[in-house]
Amino acid sequence: MQVSLVPLITVNGIYPDLLVIFLVYLALRKGQLFGTVAGFVIGFFFDIFSGSVLGAAMFSKTLAGFTAGYFYNENKIQYNLNSYLFILIVFFCGALDSLFYQLLISNKIEINFAVLFFRQSILPAVFTAVLSLIWVIFKPQRDTGV
């Protein structure tokens, strides 16, 4: 879906990362270890299907899953998934994922870090966080029976 659907919603070369939204969801639901392993597996399949540098997405998604797992709290799973904190976690993990992915796949020797950080890290993370807002707003609420 990331390889086939996302190019349709790309704006000026800035693209959201739907896999990071899913990865943050998994890490907040199941914990840091699960998020780290899920990031590795998701990154591996992304590398295979996208034809990109093998290992770049594996590393960046593993790092994003590991980082998202820091926000895991067994007592606050529903709060973290249903609040605006989810959007902030997606933004932070998306920026981290995009930054390291771009650093690993860039073949330019002279990299302007400010441009790389803003255009290839922050802007995609903002786009991804805006899309995760859809999850927070329209996610069906569970009836707790109280």
Image (cartoon, rainbow, N blue to C red):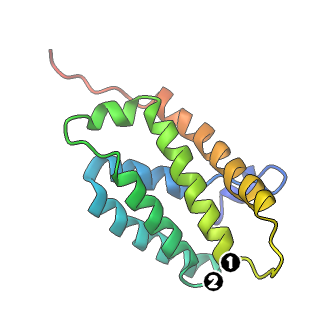
Disc 2 designates what residue?
53
Residue at the extreme left of the image, as rendered:
146
Q: Is residue 2 visible?
A: no
Q: Quadrant of residue 76?
A: top left
Q: Residue at x 56, y 45 (%)?
A: 91
What amino acid is found at the position of numbered circle 2 in the picture? Val
Relative to 65, does residue 110 appear above or below in the rendering?
A: below
> Residue placed at 71% from the left, 57% from the top?
117
Quadrant of the rendering where the C terminus is positioned? top left
- The amino acid sitting under disc 1 is Ile
Callouts 1 and 2 close, C-beta under 8 Å: yes
Q: Is residue 107 left or right of residue 136?
A: right
Residue 8: mark in rendering: none
Q: Position of residue 5 (x, y in %)?
A: 65, 57
- Residue picked out by circle 1: 105
- In this rendering, the answer to whether 84 lies above or below 107 is above
Give the crowd class for mark 2: few <14, some 14-19, many >=20 residues within 10 Å. some
Asked which secondary structure carries label 1, the reply is helix
Q: Quadrant of the N terminus?
A: bottom right
Which of the 4 image quarters holds residue 65? bottom left
Residue found at x 77% / y 82%: 107
Q: Which residue is at the front of the view, 14 or 116? A: 116
Q: CA distance from mark 1 to mark 2?
A: 6 Å
In front of the other: label 1 or label 2?
1
Of residues 117 and 5, the one drawn nearer to the viewer in this rendering? 117
Q: Position of residue 37 (x, y in %)?
A: 34, 69
Residue 144: image quadrant is top left
Determine whether the residue tagged by mark 2 lies in a helix, strand or loop: loop
Q: Residue sitting at 55 percent across and 34 percent down?
A: 134
